[in-house]
Structure formats: structure tokens, C-alpha cells
């Protein structure tokens, strides 16, 4: 796979865009896998048609909506959910205070690896999904069907048909998260700040869309990981969608590992990013030793990473930082400067990325949407040869 070495993270060697091969399996199990897929796919199709034709028009949060989503998860064998909440002991989840779990009026910043992310969040929270862009603070509210299609970077077919196409065109307007939360105070907002799917082995560079939230709005980092891990969808296209359906329905069972981090706010993130630098400056002055800006940033990151760690284990790579030269360049230029990110705001995004990396037990990578676009182009031209060498 040397051909794709440029799409690995230079610091860690992680390749977040490579598809994950299924676990080794005996050829003797192929008839059983075919049987499972033959039984499950028609039932899953029926449950999905019920959703499209009737259930999705019901009020948000209704029992039938959630029951249908659990059917969409349970039919392919997603039966095991390993859920942990930061600072909450196992077995005491029912006694968790309201502020420890996402609730209406808050935002979920979720990892982004698979369509199962969308189905699970819909089954639990029945939220409003949004689409983020790498160079904009604005988000676009989208339907659950579009959120699923975005996992494969394909167009939702329903958006191309009749009245739905007109409604979609009218709903293309982007807006800040603060306005979206204000317009929907009884709903939870789901944000995928990485803007594109990965294979779950690293956290990509985050979009500045999270910064458009009101400073007092709580943001919950949520990490979702899967066993087996081959149900991720880093490669776009209809062929990969069909391959995902096969892997999902031919596997006997699937487990989702869900980790919900401690809520934070933009205001708290800005204050935490400012206070360590002040402390560093004062301590340097007292000791008579000058501190370079890069040293101050690394000390601030280390101090910030130690705050709110919760009960999950951490390791050295949780604080892996991007290059100081890494910035979010905005192609959108308006009066609010949507594309520009200050150093303090960059630290806020870094803190959220660190939380997602800690919860998922993975590392951060200095790769994002642009690198994935180049990788997909290279994969499409020489993917078969690369797979053969692998």
C-alpha cells in the first residue's frame, strides 16, 4: 500500500480513509451468511419502507418512530450496546442526573464512521441532523435519509423526486447552530464535525461549524465504535453502499460501543484556552525564562487535556496535536467572517477533538476533507492494484 502512503497521518502513520477488511471467516460459513442476508434484507427493506411511507411523518419523539429505528438496528443483528457516560459508574445509568446526558436544546458532536451512527442516534434521541462543511461555520439541517446518504457521499434519491425536490431546494439554506437551536428548543441537534466519514481509526480535522453555537449551549461529545469494525464506510459510492448492506446483514451480530463525554460549552472552552496561557506567562516571568509561543501552546494543551478527563483511561496519544500551521481556511467570506478561526477558537475545536479521541481510544490525525477527496480519486484510479498488494 505504499502507493497511498501520502494519505497516512505523518505523525502517527494512521490511514483513516482505508476500508477495513472483514474478520477472517471460514468458507464453510458462506451458506450461513447467505441465509442470514436472504432473510434479513427483505425484512429490513419492509421496515425501511414503513419508515418512508408513514412513520417519518409522525411527531418527533413518538414511540412508533423510535420503535421503527430499533427495528432497523435489530434486524441486521445490532443487538449489543455497550454504553458508558463520563463520570458515571457502570450499573448506575438509570440514576444519572439530567445534565450528564444530551437533552433538548443541546448539541451532540458525534464521531462519523458509519450509517449506524445515524440510526443509533435517531433511535435514542430522535434529533435534528445537520451537515457541516470544512470551511464554514454554518450548517444545513438535513433529514435522516439524507444523513444516511451522506455517509456514502451520494445524493438522497428522495431529494430528486417531485415535491420533495422543491422542499429540498427550499431547505438548502445554511444557518448558524445558535439559530437552529433557538428555532427547535425541544429537539437535540446532531453535528458531525469531521464533515466526512473515516474508518474510525482516527479523529479527522474538525469543521469550524461547532463555533456557531451559542456560548452557553451545552455540547456533548459522543463516540461510536463497532465490533466487527468492517461496517464503517470511508469510501463513497453506491457500490460501497451495497457492500455495507451485505456486511451488515451477513454478520451474525454487531456490537456498538457508545461513549458519551462530559458536556462543555464554547464559553468554557474559551476560558480554559485563555487561562493556561496566562499562567504559563506568569510562571515564565517569575522564573526569568522566556517561553516561545509553541511551548506555551503545548503546555496549554496539556493542561486543558487534563481537565474533565472523567473515568475513562487515557494515554499519551490523547493529546496529539496538529501542526501549529494548521488552520481552517474559509472559502466563505461574509460580514461575520465564517471561515476565519482565531487561536482561542482553534483551542476550543482542539479540546472537542481531544475528547472524541479519548472517548474512542484513538488518535487525532492531521487529515481532513481535502485529503480524503484526493485519496478517493487515487483509490478510484488504482484501488484494485492497491488491494492486490495489500
Image (tube, rainbow, N blue to C red):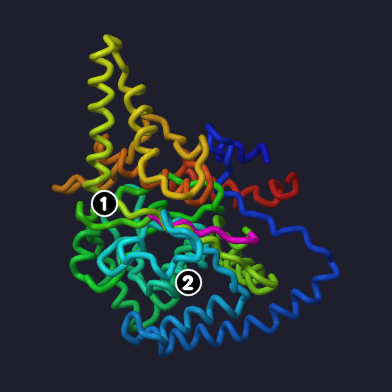
According to the picture, the residue beneath numbered tag 1 turns out to be 265
Residue located at (48% from left, 88% from top): 50
First in sequence, mark 2 or 1: give its number.
Answer: 2
Residue located at (27% from left, 44% from top): 269
SS label for mark 1: loop
Image coordinates for residue 42, horizontal then vertical, percent:
62, 85
Residue closest to the eye, 268 or 292: 268
Do the CB atoms of the residues marked 2 and 1 lie less than 8 Å apart? Answer: no
Give the crowd class for mark 2: few <14, some 14-19, many >=20 residues within 10 Å: many
The reply, left or right, for residue 318 in relation to residue 273 is: right
The reply, left or right, for residue 248 in relation to residue 168 is: right
Based on the picture, tell me whether residue 286 belongs to the magenta stretch: no
Residue located at (65% from left, 74% from top): 249
According to the picture, the residue beneath numbered tag 2 turns out to be 119
The reply, left or right, for residue 293 in relation to residue 255 is: left
Image coordinates for residue 180, horizontal then vertical, percent:
23, 65
Amino acid at each position: 500500500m505504499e502507493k497511498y502512503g501520502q494519505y497516512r497521518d505523518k505523525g502517527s502513520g494512521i490511514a483513516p480513509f482505508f476500508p477495513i477488511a472483514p474478520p477472517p471467516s471460514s468458507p464453510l460459513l458462506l451458506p450461513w451468511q447467505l441465509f442470514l442476508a436472504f432473510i434479513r434484507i427483505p425484512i429490513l427493506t419492509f421496515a425501511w419502507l414503513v419508515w418512508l411511507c408513514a412513520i417519518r411523518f409522525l411527531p418527533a419523539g413518538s414511540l412508533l418512530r423510535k420503535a421503527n429505528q430499533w427495528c432497523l438496528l435489530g434486524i441486521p443483528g445490532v443487538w449489543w450496546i455497550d454504553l458508558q457516560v463520563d463520570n458515571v459508574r457502570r450499573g448506575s445509568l438509570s440514576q444519572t442526573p439530567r445534565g450528564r446526558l444530551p437533552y433538548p436544546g443541546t448539541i451532540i458532536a458525534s464521531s462519523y464512521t458509519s450509517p449506524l451512527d445515524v440510526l443509533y442516534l435517531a433511535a435514542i434521541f430522535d434529533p435534528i441532523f445537520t451537515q457541516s462543511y470544512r470551511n464554514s461555520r454554518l450548517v444545513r439541517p438535513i433529514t435522516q435519509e439524507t444523513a444516511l446518504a451522506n455517509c456514502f457521499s451520494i445524493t438522497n434519491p428522495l431529494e430528486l423526486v417531485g415535491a420533495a425536490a422543491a422542499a429540498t431546494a427550499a431547505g438548502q439554506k445554511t444557518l448558524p447552530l445558535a439559530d437552529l437551536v433557538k428555532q427547535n428548543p425541544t429537539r437535540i441537534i446532531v453535528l458531525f464535525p469531521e464533515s466526512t466519514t473515516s474508518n474510525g481509526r482516527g479523529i479527522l480535522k474538525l469543521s469550524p461549524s461547532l463555533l456557531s453555537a451559542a456560548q452557553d449551549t451545552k455540547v456533548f461529545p459522543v463516540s461510536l465504535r463497532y465490533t466487527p469494525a468492517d461496517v464503517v464506510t470511508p469510501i463513497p459510492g453506491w457500490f460501497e453502499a451495497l457492500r455495507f448492506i451485505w456486511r451488515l446483514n451477513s454478520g451474525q451480530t454487531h456490537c456498538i460501543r457508545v461513549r458519551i463525554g462530559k458536556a462543555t460549552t464554547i464559553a468554557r472552552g474559551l476560558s480554559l484556552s485563555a487561562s493556561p496561557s496566562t499562567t504559563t506567562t506568569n510562571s515564565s516571568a517569575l522564573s526569568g525564562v522566556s517561553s516561545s509561543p509553541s511551548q506555551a501552546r503545548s503546555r496549554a494543551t496539556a493542561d486543558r487535556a487534563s481537565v474533565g478527563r472523567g473515568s475513562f483511561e487515557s494515554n499519551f496519544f490523547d493529546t496529539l496535536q496538529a501542526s501549529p500551521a494548521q488552520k481552517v481556511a474559509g472559502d466563505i467570506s461574509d460580514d461575520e467572517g465564517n471561515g476565519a478561526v482565531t487561536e482561542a477558537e482553534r483551542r476550543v475545536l482542539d479540546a472537542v477533538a481531544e475528547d472524541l479521541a479519548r472517548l474512542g481510544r484513538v488518535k487525532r490525525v492531521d487529515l481532513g476533507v481535502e485529503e480524503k477527496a484526493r485519496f478517493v480519486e487515487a483509490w478510484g484510479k488504482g484501488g484494485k492494484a492497491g488491494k492486490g498488494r495489500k
